[in-house]
Amino acid sequence: MKTDFAAHNGSEPANPASVGQRENRQAIADRMEALAIELRSLSDDEMQTVPTEGTLFALARKIYSARRKVDEIFGVPGFSVSPAWDILLDLYQAKNMGKEISVTSACIGAACPPTTALRWLQALESLQLVKRQQDHEDKRRSMVKLTEGGKVKVVNALALHL
C-alpha cells in the first residue's frame, strides 16, 4: 500500500505511517494551521516577546554604562538621572517635531517641582545647552530650546543607548 507521499513521489516510504500516526500528524498539522491563523490576527502590541534573563542583564549593564557616559558627556555627575536630562530629552523631541516648548512646559516635562526645574533650566543655560527666548506671539511667555551644542551632546548621549 502506498501512502500519499509515496503516490506523489512514486516511491515507497522507508517506514509507512500507521493509521494512528497519520491521524496524529494530521492533528498536529491542523493545530499548527490554527496557530498560524491566530498569529496572523495578533497586533504588533500583542506579539511582544518576553525578554530572557540574559537580555535583561545585558540591558541593565548597557543602561548603567550609558548613564555614566552621559554624565561624562555633560560633565556633571548624576546628570543622566536628573530633571535636566528629562528637560533635554523633551526639548530634543520638540525640536524634531517642529514644536516650541515654553518654560512652563519644560518644567512640567522635568517631572519635578517647578522651582527645581527652573534651577535646572538655569544650570542648562549656564552650560549653554539651552536658551530662552521671548515668545513672539505672547510677550508674557518665554520659550526654551536646545542650542546646537546642546543638540550635539544629546545626540551623542542618545547614541549610547543603541
Image (cartoon, rainbow, N blue to C red):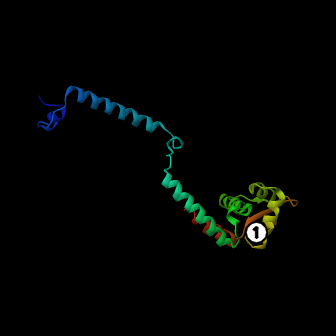
For residue 156, say whether it is visible: yes
The image quadrant of residue 35 is top left
Q: Is residue 73 above or below residue 110?
A: below
**Residue 57 picture location, percent across and down:** 53, 56
Q: Is residue 106 above or below residue 21?
A: below
Label 1: which secondary element: helix
Q: Residue at x 67, y 59 (%)?
A: 93
Q: Is residue 7 above or below residue 86?
A: above
The foreground one among 112 and 78 is 78
Quadrant of the snapshot with the N terminus: top left
**Residue 105 picture location, percent across and down:** 78, 55
Labels in figure, total: 1
Q: Which residue is outermost to the right? A: 140
Going by the numbered disc 1, the residue's amino acid type is Leu
**Residue 89 picture location, percent across and down:** 68, 61
Quadrant of the snapshot with the C terminus: bottom right
Q: Residue at x 15, y 38 (%)?
A: 9
Q: Residues within 10 Å of mark 1 (few under 14, many from 20)?
A: many
For residue 135, say whether it is visible: no
**Residue 68 picture location, percent across and down:** 63, 68
Identify the residue under disc 1.
124
Classify residue 41 as left or right of residue 1. right
The image quadrant of residue 121 is bottom right
Classify residue 50 as left or right of residue 75. left
Q: Residue at x 75, y 73 (%)?
A: 128
The foreground one among 132 and 137 is 132
Classify residue 136 as left or right of residue 63. right
The foreground one among 96 and 111 is 111
